Image: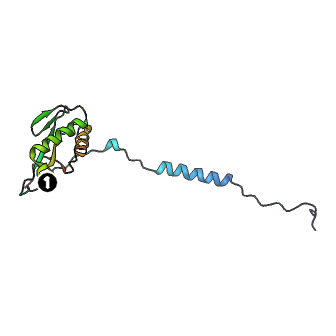
Amino acid sequence: MNFRKGLGKEDPEINLIPFIDVLLVILIFLMVTTTYSRFTELQITLPTADAEKAQEKPSQIEIGIDAQGRYKINSEAVSFLDTATLANDLKKAADALGSGKGNPDPVIIINADRATSHQSVIDVLEAARIAGLAKVTFAAQASSGGK
């Protein structure tokens, strides 16, 4: 017997409350079991280099940076106002080596004190880019237990 002849059929409903409860439990579980890495806890020891010296010595420009951020280009002190002035000093040093006379671009060797700020080294890299000098390398101290 059908007592509800006049009423239409009801659409079935999905109850979302238990679904949300299960998702919240999973979320809490994931938050508790996730491990987070902390970069402040890293102990970084920079590498030392053990390599044989090159047989042929290319033309090079040595840039020294001390712990106070003072610059020297080929053992001559230069004043740092901005990267553009440092780029001009690099161009002058490259011209003094004769790079404009068919010689290949000189290699820029950065000798930075280990206490030098990172920004000082980035300033030298930016000045080299502005000056159009693409060959850049860093000087490293040879390890004491080397060959």
User: Which residue is the extreme one toward the bottom?
Assistant: 1
Residue occupied by mark 1 = 104
Q: Position of residue 123 (x, y in %)?
A: 25, 39
What residue is at 20 percent from the left and 48 percent from the top?
133
Task: Relative to 48, say whether 7 is above or below.
Answer: below
Q: Would you call the spot at circle 1 few (<14 residues within 10 Å), some (14-19), or many (20 or more)?
A: few
Which is nearer the eye, 91 or 106?
91
What residue is at 49 percent from the left and 48 percent from the top?
32
Judge left or right: residue 85 versus residue 62: right
Is residue 143 in view from this perspective? Answer: no
Which is nearer the eye, 96 or 57?
96
Q: Position of residue 22 (x, y in %)?
A: 61, 54
Which is nearer the eye, 111 or 84?
84
What scheme was used to colour the molecule?
Answer: rainbow
Q: Position of residue 139 (x, y in %)?
A: 15, 46
Task: Relative to 9, say whether 36 is above or below.
Answer: above
Q: Position of residue 33 (x, y in %)?
A: 47, 51
Q: Which element carries disc 1, helix, strand or loop? A: loop
Task: Relative to 147, say whether 91 is above or below.
Answer: above
Judge left or right: residue 110 versus residue 83: left
The amino acid at mark 1 is Pro
Which is nearer the eye, 81 or 65?
81
Q: Quadrant of residue 14?
A: bottom right
The quadrant of the picture occupied by the N terminus is bottom right
The quadrant of the picture occupied by the C terminus is bottom left
